[in-house]
């Protein structure tokens, strides 16, 4: 994204295990060329990042259009399934142009929150009724362009979504999601091309949305390309019950049977699991993406993240439905929800939660050289203020604890992607008036 050599001076830097004061980063061609510690004052000409600088944050699970639902779905009571009807009504109104405008604003909001990469779980492929656009990937291309214009990386997780439930065809809302068969899905998304800011991955919406005899087609497509593969897994008990009735096993067991689980696969939510499911997921090194703010917003439940990690499943975090866009809140919510469930404290250190929000999140999205502050890594950085009403007071050496357990997205002062300021002093450098852009995009979608 940039070829201009430059130096950044970090007042305080999180180096994976500790906070180091006075760190200079030399950046060339968008990568960190050198990390110099013990630099108490800024070198001449260096760009100064005051506060605590972390590796860029990775939002491993996003549905960009759900941002239009914020607050509107909080009226009245209901369940995941009633919420889903409101979500479908919003999806029905999307066009390539309106989706581009909305996603561009949403990704800019993410940049303001310190997010430098997003995994977009993308299934709104066709026009309402299921007719392909002249460009069958018009909606996906709109998302790729939106991320580029907002200045962040994207992994487009092109999603196979073929049925409304086990053995049932898509309903009228879902027709625009479906390619008919997994082979047709693979043919369409094979046309998508990666670029500097973008990776192309795959997703299985869920075991209820992809017939069992077609799961291997999606998994094989991802395996051939060594691409990330994500899947909504056991988010709802109703899915588990239906899967057991039809297939005589749990969703995780069904995925294992058809070769879906593995180290490039990430299960999203992984909420209602048996002990055998946890062993299958962890034993295969399948990742787990927790989305606590959405899981509690939709009353989904609290997944067994501690057990999954103990069994070998790397953890990542996502804002999913964007009830809020705040990876610090997602990180602390994972710990705090576990405290409520167990009535004990300290399941993860701040360092472990930051790892889920950074390096492991990037790895889940196929950006294996991102998420750390070290030579050779991509120069993606997030700087958190240490002098706001939320963060002032603690010693700087406790910066990790302050970031995870006190800071919010509002405390992000700078976001750097590939060595280029995307957010400077709390303002987006590429998208003017992000709140206005969000408001206009959502109002236009509702018109």
Image (tube, rainbow, N blue to C red):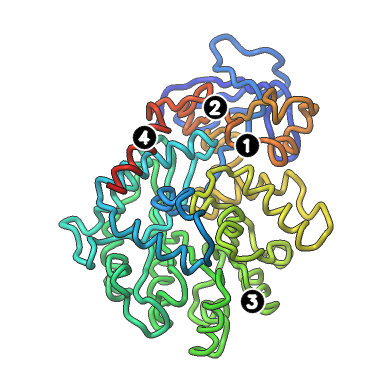
Q: Which residue lies at the image location 68% right of the left edge and 62% below the top edge?
A: 305
- Quadrant of residue 23 within the rendered picture: top right
Which residue carries the number 4 mark?
437
Q: Which mark is residue 414?
A: 2
- Quadrant of residue 149 within the rendered picture: top left
Which residue carries the number 1 mark?
408
Q: Which residue lies at the image location 69% right of the left edge and 26% below the top edge?
A: 389
Q: Quadrant of the N terminus?
A: top left
Q: Which x, y percent locates residue 73?
A: 47, 55
Dot 1 falls on a residue whose secondary structure is: loop
Mark 4 and mark 3: Cα distance apart in space: 43 Å
Other-residue count near label 4 (Cα within 10 Å), few / some / many at <14 / 14–19 / ≥20: some
Mark 1 and mark 2: Cα distance apart in space: 13 Å
Q: Which residue lies at the image location 79% right of the left edge and 28% below the top edge?
A: 394
Other-residue count near label 2 (Cα within 10 Å), few / some / many at <14 / 14–19 / ≥20: many
Q: Which x, y percent locates residue 93?
A: 28, 55
Other-residue count near label 1 (Cα within 10 Å), few / some / many at <14 / 14–19 / ≥20: many
Report the front residue among 209 and 43. Answer: 209
271 relative to 153 in the view: left or right: right
Dot 4 falls on a residue whose secondary structure is: helix
Of circles 1 and 2, the one toward us is 1
Please determine whether, in this image, residue 73 is positioned above or below residue 223.
above
* Label 1 vs 2, first from the N-terminus: 1
Please determine whether, in this image, residue 204 is positioned above or below residue 439.
below
């Amino acid at each position: 994204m940039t070829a201009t050599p430059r130096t950044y001076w970090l007042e305080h830097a999180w180096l994976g295990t500790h906070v180091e004061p006075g760190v200079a980063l030399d950046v060339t061609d968008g990568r960190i060329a050198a990390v110099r510690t013990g630099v108490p004052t800024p070198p001449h000409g260096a760009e100064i990042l005051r506060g605590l600088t972390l590796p860029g944050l990775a939002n491993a699970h996003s549905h960009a259009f759900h941002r239009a639902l914020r607050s509107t779905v909080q009226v009245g009571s209901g369940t995941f399934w009633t919420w889903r009807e409101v979500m479908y009504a919003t999806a029905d109104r999307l066009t390539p142009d309106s989706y581009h405008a909305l996603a561009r604003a949403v990704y800019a909001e993410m940049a303001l929150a310190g997010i430098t990469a997003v995994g977009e779980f993308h299934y709104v492929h066709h026009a309402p009724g299921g007719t392909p656009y002249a460009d069958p990937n018009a909606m996906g291309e709109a998302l790729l362009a939106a991320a580029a214009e907002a200045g962040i990386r994207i992994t487009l997780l092109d999603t196979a979504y073929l049925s409304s439930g086990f053995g049932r065809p898509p309903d009228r809302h879902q027709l625009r999601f479906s390619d008919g068969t997994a082979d047709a899905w693979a043919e369409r998304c094979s046309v998508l091309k990666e670029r500097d800011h973008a990776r192309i991955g795959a997703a299985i919406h869920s075991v209820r949305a992809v017939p069992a005899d077609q799961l291997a087609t999606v998994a094989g497509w991802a395996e051939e390309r060594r691409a990330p593969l994500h899947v909504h897994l056991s988010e709802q008990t109703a899915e588990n019950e239906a899967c057991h009735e039809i297939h005589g096993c749990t969703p995780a067991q069904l995925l294992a049977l058809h070769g879906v689980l593995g180290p490039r696969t990430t299960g999203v939510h992984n909420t209602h699991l048996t002990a055998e499911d946890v062993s299958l997921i962890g034993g295969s090194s399948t990742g787990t993406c927790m989305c606590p703010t959405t899981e509690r917003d939709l009353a989904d439940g609290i997944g067994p993240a501690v057990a999954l990690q103990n069994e070998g499943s790397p953890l990542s975090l996502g804002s999913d439905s964007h009830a809020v866009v705040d990876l610090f809140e997602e990180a602390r919510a994972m710990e705090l929800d576990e405290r409520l469930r167990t009535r004990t404290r300290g399941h993860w250190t701040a360092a472990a939660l930051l790892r889920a929000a950074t390096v492991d999140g990037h790895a889940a999205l196929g950006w294996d050289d991102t998420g750390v502050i070290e030579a050779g890594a991509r120069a993606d950085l997030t700087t958190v203020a240490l002098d706001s009403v939320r963060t002032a007071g603690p010693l700087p050496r406790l910066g990790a604890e302050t970031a995870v357990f006190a800071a919010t997205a509002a405390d992000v002062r700078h976001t750097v992607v590939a060595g280029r300021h995307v957010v400077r002093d709390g303002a987006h450098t590429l998208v003017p008036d992000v709140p206005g852009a969000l408001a206009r995009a959502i109002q236009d979608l509702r018109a």
